[in-house]
Amino acid sequence: MSAEEIAWSAPDERGISTAVLGKATASSLRGRRLRRALRVQPTDTEVWPAAWRRLAAQWLKVAISADTRLQWESLLRKAGAEGANSALALHEHLLMHGQVEFEEARDHSGWTLKRIRFTDPVGLRQRLRLAEPDADLRAWQLRREALDYAAPDLLAAARDLDTCAPKTALARADLLDALARWRDEARAAGAPRAGTRRDFSLFARGDTKAITDADWAWLEARFDLAADGIVAHAPLMLLRASFAAHTLTGSLELDAVPAFVGVPPAVIHALTRIEPAPRRWRLVENRTVFDRLAATLSPEEALVWLPGYPPGWWLRAMQHLLHLAPAPAQIACDPDPDGVAIALLAAAPWEGGGLAWTPDSMDADALDRLPAKRELSPRDLALLDRLLQQALPPALTGLLEAMRATGQKGEQEGLF
C-alpha cells in the first residue's frame, strides 16, 4: 500500500493517528496497523539524555532513508537490558513529536510493536550532528573518480581499494597520494628518499604513529617499500668478510669478528679503502643460507646478505664497496621466478662497473636436486614469461625453462 492510499484516522487525545493495513479490520486477530503523529513537532535534541543520544545514533545509522523500516525487537536487543527503558522512553518521545511511525501486529495478546520508520531521518541526523550513513560511500565514489597515477603499482593499488570499506578506502587513498609525493620529492632530489616507517607516517599523516598495522600490511602487500626508502628501522647491510675497512678517522677490522656484522649505509659510504680486497663477492638472498655460509666462508671471499628485491640504499652501498674492492660475484637466490628477477637486479652494480657475475646454484640441475618443490602460481608464470624475453645468463635461462616445463619452483635452503 502506497503512502497516498493509507487512510489515517483523526488524532486521538494524544495526537496519534491510526491507519489499518490490508483488508483485515482492526478487530481481526491478524490485523496490522500504523500509528504516528501526523503533526510533526521539532524536538530539542540538545537537552536529550546521553543515553537517548547514543541510542538515536545507533538507530539512525541503519535508518538510511524515510523508507527504511527497522525491526523493533532488534533495536531493543541491541540496547540491552540496561538500555531497554531508555529505548522505550526515546521511542515514545519520537512518536509524540511525529518523528517516527510504528507498525503494530495483532495477536491473541493484543497489539504488539513490530517495526518503526523514521519520518525524517536526514533532518534528525542533522540536528544530532551525525554523519550520513552513506557519507563515506559518496565521498569515496567522488574520490575514486579523481584517482589517477602514472606509476602502475600506485594505479593497481588504487583499483584494489574498491574491495575495502569506503572509510578505509578513503584513508588508504590518502596513503597512495602520500607515497606518490614521497617519490616525487625523491625524483626532484635526484636520489631515493630514505626513512623509517615513522618518518613516512609523519610525512603522510602528520603523526609518527598514525598508520595502523593493518594499513602497513596493506602497503607492504602492494609495494616494495624498501625500494622507496621506507624501512621498519634504520637499514643495515649484513656482511661477513676478512678485510679491514678504513675511513678517514679509523678502521673496522672485520677479520677480527668471527661472525657477520651489520653496517649502516652511512658507514659504508664513509669507507675510503678496503684491504686486502676479496677475490670474490658472494651474495645470498636466503637468510638461513647466509647464516650457514657465514660460518664457513673462505678468507678470500666476502659474503653479503641480499634482502629480497634490493632496495636503493643497498644497491648504492654495494656499488661503493665495489668501487673500493672490485671483484667478480656469485649470486645465489631462490630457484623461482622472483629469485631470478632479484639476481638480475642485484647484479646491476657489477654490470655497471664492467665486472663479471655468475648465478650460484640457480640452474635446471639445482631445481632438480631440490628435495621439495612448490607449484608455480599464475603470477609466477607471468613473471617467468617476461624474464624469458630478456637476455639472460645461460644458467638462468635453463632454470626458467625447467620451471616452465615442470610447473614447479623451489627455495635455497635445499641447495646449501
Image: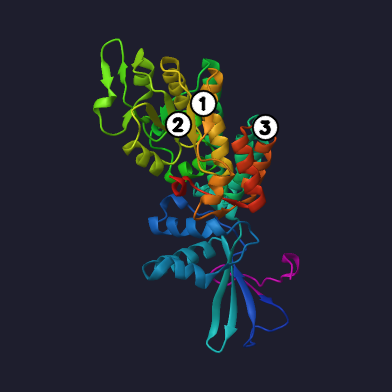
Q: Residue furthest top?
A: 248
Rendering coords of residue 155 (x, y %):
64, 36
Q: Which mark is residue 257?
A: none
Question: What amino acid does circle 3 point to?
Answer: Gln
Q: Gap between marks 1 and 2, in whole Å? A: 10 Å
Q: Residues within 10 Å of mark 1 (few under 14, many from 20)?
A: many
Query: Could you tell me the amino acid type at mark 2?
Result: Ile
**Image quadrant occupied by the C terminus:** top left
Q: Which label belongs to residue 182?
A: 1
Residue 9 sits inside the magenta stretch: yes
Disc nearer the start of the sequence (1/3): 1
Residue found at x 53% / y 64%: 96
Report the disc number at residue 230: 2
Q: Which residues are magenta?
A: 1-19
Which callout, 1 or 2, points to the residue nearer the camera? 2
Main SS type for the magenta part? loop
The amino acid on which the numbered mark 1 sits, given as a three-letter code, is Trp
The structure residue drawn at horizontal position 65% and vertical position 87%, both measured from the top left corner, is 28
Query: What is the CA distance from the residue labelled 1 to the residue labelled 3?
Result: 31 Å
Residue 260 in percent (x, y) is at 31, 33
Earlier in the chain: of badge 1 and badge 2, it is 1
Which residue in the rendered view is the most extreme toward the left? Answer: 256
Q: Check disc 2 and report its element: helix, strand or loop.
A: strand
Q: Is residue 261 left or right of residue 111?
A: left
Q: Earlier in the sequence, mark 3 or mark 2?
A: 2
Using residue 390 as the reference point, say whether residue 365 is left or right of it.
left
**Are discs 1 and 2 less than 8 Å apart at CB?**
yes
Front residue of this view, candidates 317 and 71: 317
According to the picture, the residue beneath numbered tag 3 turns out to be 390
Q: Is residue 167 visible?
A: no
